Amino acid sequence: MGSMSWIHWVIVIGIVALLFGGRGKLSSVMGDAAKGIRAFKDGLKDDTSSEAADNKAKGALPRTEAEAEELRKS
C-alpha cells in the first residue's frame, strides 16, 4: 500500500464515489453528462444560425448552392 501516492488514492476514491455514491446509479450520472453535451451542441447550432442571419442582413454572397436556393425562395 505504500507504493501508491496520495494522488492515486484521490483518483480511486473519486471513482468509487462516482460508482457508488451520489444518486446511486451510474446511468443517471451518464444521462446528465449526455444532456450537458446535447445542450452544448444545441448552443453551437444556435451560434451558426445567427451567423447566417448576420450574413444575410449584410448582403453577403451565399457560400453554397443550398444557400443560394434559400435566398431565391425568400
Image (cartoon, grey):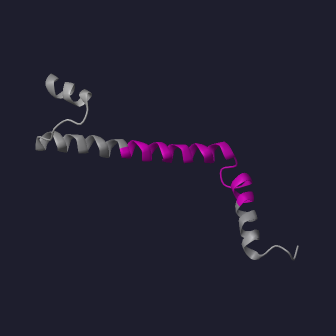
State the residue in front, 12 or 45.
45
Is residue 74 visible in this depiction of the protein? no
Residue 30 in view: yes
Q: Position of residue 32 (x, y in %)?
A: 56, 46
The percent position of residue 48, horizontal first and vertical second, equals 30, 43
Chief secondary structure of the magenta portion:
helix
Residue 33 within the magenta-colored segment of the rendering: yes
Which stretch did the figure color magenta?
Answer: 15-44
| Image position of 31 (left or right of 6) | left
Give the vertical position of 3 relative to 45 (above or below).
Answer: below
Quadrant of the image for the C terminus? top left
Q: Residue at x 69, y 55 (%)?
A: 18
Q: In the image, what residue occupies the spot 24% across and 36% down?
A: 63
Horizontal relation, residue 5 to residue 38: left or right: right
Q: Is residue 64 above or below residue 47?
A: above
In the picture, residue 12 is in which quadrant? bottom right
Q: Residue furthest right?
A: 1
Seen at 37% across and 46% down, the residue is 43
- From the top left corner, tell me how far across and down residue 46 is, in percent: 32, 43
- Assign the N terminus to one quadrant of the image: bottom right
Residue toward you, 71 or 65: 65
Q: Is residue 69 left or right of residue 16?
A: left
